[in-house]
Image (cartoon, rainbow, N blue to C red):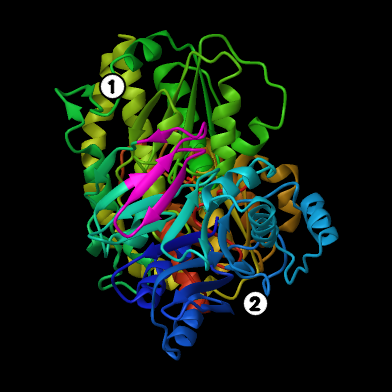
Amino acid sequence: MCGIVAAVTQRNIADFLIDSIKKLEYRGYDSSGLAVIDNKNNIIRIRCVGKVNELIKKTNKKKILGNIGVAHTRWATHGKVSKENTHPHISSNIIVVHNGIIENNSVLRLFLQKKGYIFSSDTDTEVIAHLLHWEQNKKKDSLKKVIQNSIKQLDGNYSMVVMDKNNPSKLIAARSGSPLIIGLGIEENFIASDQIALLHVTKRFIYLEEGDIAIVKKKEINIFNKDNFFIKRKEIISNTEYKSVKKGKYRHYMEKEIYEQPTSILNTLKNRLKNKNKVYFSELALEANDVFYNTENIQIVACGTSYNAAMVAKHWFESLANIPCDVEIASEFSSRKLTVRKKSLLITLSQSGETADTLLALRYSKKLGYLGNLTICNMESSSLVKESDFYILTKAGLEIGVASTKSFTTQLTVLLMLVAKIINLKKENNNISQKIVQTLNLLPMRIEKILKKNYIIKSVANILANKKNMLYLGRGNQYPIAMEGALKLKEIAYIHAEAYPSGELKHGPLALIDKNIPVIMIAPKNSLLEKNKKNIKEICSRGGLIYVFSDQEFDHEDNMNVIKLPYVEELIAPIFYIIPLQLLAYYIALKKGKEIDQPRHLAKSVTVE
Ligand code: G6P
């Protein structure tokens, strides 16, 4: 969580810092701040509570002339949202921005207080700043040595950038737990948590590895690994287009990302479906084929929306490929003693590839005797990709809206392709893999069609916008779609929504049914339709208000509304049915005037446990 940018530049540093930190707002947006060492060697610090726009307003009022600085956007962990707790934190000449959590911060705080340090915030970051200052003044070592001595005393994650007023020609970046990227310029260099923040100034990047420390100057970068050996890290040229980060004609990134789904799915499928039933992932190492061939069980771990996608995949792996598949929330997976099933493949699923819970689950799984591990991820340069045996990219493109949309549908697309690939490798039932390949080719067009029905969903949204609670129901592989629909509504419209398997209604939630709690039911034509119809009757006969999303006709009941959707093949129906639910949440949030792209208290990339 939290976003960091820093730079030693030829250009006006303040403008660069605010332009760049604005692009990292998705990592947290409780408060933001910057610090610059100006041309007269003064530290100028500006901090404000609220979105980065507040920081921009405040910074624009000042004339700051300097070439070295750091900035930060915060997602509060230690200490409430307040100006005092906002980064950068300063201890005399030392200035720090930090992303992570220092678990032993209370012990260190006491120690430093005894040494005479006075704290002005409740944060663990201020502990780092004072500790660095204390270490620097003990032995007068170089700043790099001071940082190395200090991080030995820190438990937890400490990705940070440090600036020293007494030596304003360099920045020091230390990576632990969350990403730090160096952007290479011409006689200027940049640091950020994500390349998005730097794409307007460079396309050349170096990704720091866990434990790396980098000394970044205008004309020189020196990197040392966790064992303090000087190391050359590979330079990569990003092919991400800066323009793809803009909203274009849309009001929100989320709206843009919903409507982009036919294209993002096309990109996900491109060059990967071959010869009627063959699936090919160019990034997947050849050895993966052996692992997949020998796989008898699958365990998927993920969080949030990615978890919901995994739940759909469970149905596909079991019903299409006959492979038992378990799915677990990543934080739960690594919190317990596990028994690993025989010949089991571990799959992590993540948009960002930086979710701390998922990353920890992967690391934990390595001690447990899985056959191998695979990550399905949207970010090629992410920690999950780097640390996994194998990876497949979802190719959704950059997703900026905190609530995931195109990541979800591209994850499902990849998962269904993977099912076909495994069926092929095991030479089980080629008809099924052929059917999957054929049907996936139709998916972008099916989604185009449903997006054109947006006006129907908008009218339902206008009716439901004032509701306080909603129930989402689905059966089989549509139950996870109900979960994802409810999650979208909670995230962006702040309406309490719960998802249940339709059959579970009678075991409790039926007691809630009245006309004030609308029920959203997903009931497409499939073998479960008749059971769903019975549930509809149970709701209607108790005076409930129900909205049925289906391609079918239904007998009329009081308070029953059918949202008639276009036909879709059963195989891809879960990917299709989430679209109207994404739109529903979006239009409800729009009607309520909510901050759709940056819902309160949330962040897109959750790099803390
Ligand atoms: C956060 C985001 C969610 C996302 C989840 C998992 O909670 O707000 O939208 O689904 O993290 O993220 P991942 O990057 O691992 O898919």
Q: Examine the structure image and report whether residue 540 is included in the region drawn in magenta.
A: no
Decide if residue 514 is on the left or right side of residue 562. Answer: right
Specify which label sits upstream in the sequence, 2 or 1: 2
Q: CA distance from mark 2 to mark 1?
A: 57 Å
Task: Tell me which amino acid carries mark 1.
Answer: Ser
Against 361, residue 308 (above or below) is below
Say if residue 367 shows up in the picture: yes
Q: Which mark is residue 433?
A: 1
Against 76, residue 499 (above or below) is above
| Quarter of the rendering containing residue 50 | bottom right
Is the residue marked by circle 1 packed among few (<14), some (14-19), or many (20+) residues within 10 Å?
many
**Secondary-structure class at tag 1:** helix
From the viewer's side, name the closer residue of 108 and 170. Answer: 170
Residue beneath the point at 42% across and 73% down: 459
Rendering coords of residue 235 (x, y %) = 27, 42
Q: Quadrant of the N terminus?
A: bottom right
Task: Tell me which amino acid carries mark 2.
Answer: Lys
Say if residue 609 shows up in the picture: no
Decide if residue 188 is on the left or right side of residue 69. Answer: left
From the viewer's side, name the closer residue of 114 and 320. Answer: 114
From the viewer's side, name the closer residue of 255 and 578. Answer: 255
Q: Examine the structure image and report whether residue 212 is included in the region drawn in magenta.
A: yes
Which residue was labeled with disc 2?
A: 83
Find the residue positioned furthest to the front: 140
The magenta segment: 206-231
Picture mark count: 2
